[in-house]
Amino acid sequence: MIFLICTMLVLVTVLIVAATRSRTSVKQAQACLAAEVSYRSLAERAVQAEEEGAAAMEMVRRDVAELVERLRQIETVLKDVE
């Protein structure tokens, strides 16, 4: 009788440990998945921000080139006036 009770306690303990480990593994996998989704979202936002920054930089380059050309034209006009 005592042997049967001890055996049952050992089996119940083993089952509890196995269930706890399984649950812990599931929680870890869920946390890892959530972190991966968050990282992917961050990466997508970073790419979008980089593309917007590149577009803005291109607009600034064009504006500066236009200003340089206008300044050259003004200098030419001023030299002609002298």
Image (cartoon, rainbow, N blue to C red):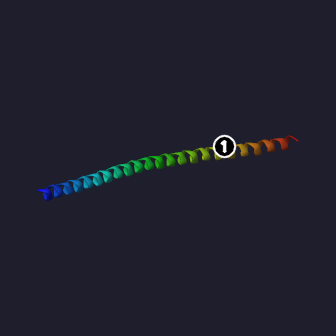
Screen quadrant of the N terminus: bottom left
Kind of residue at badge 1: Asp
Look at mark 1 in the image and give the residue it sits on.
Answer: 63
In the rendered image, the residue lying farthest to the front is 2
| Rendered residue at 65%/47% (across/down) | 61
9 with respect to 39 (left or right): left
| Rendered residue at 18%/57% (across/down) | 6
13 with respect to 50 (left or right): left
For disc 1, the neighbor class at 10 Å (few under 14, some 14 to 19, many from 20) is few
On the image, the x and y values in percent for residue 31 come to 38, 49
Q: Nearer the viewer, residue 64 or 25?
A: 25
| Rendered residue at 24%/52% (across/down) | 16
Q: Nearer the viewer, residue 9 or 68?
A: 9
Q: Is 81 located above or below residue 23 in the figure?
A: above
Q: Nearer the viewer, residue 21 or 64?
A: 21
In the rendered image, the residue lying farthest to the left is 1
In the rendered image, the residue lying farthest to the right is 82
As helix, strand or loop, the secondary structure at mark 1 comes to: helix
On the image, the x and y values in percent for residue 75 come to 80, 44
On the image, the x and y values in percent for residue 2 come to 14, 57
On the image, the x and y values in percent for residue 7 come to 17, 58
19 with respect to 8 (left or right): right
| Rendered residue at 59%/44% (across/down) | 56
Q: How many marks?
A: 1
Screen quadrant of the C terminus: top right
Q: Nearer the viewer, residue 22 or 78?
A: 22
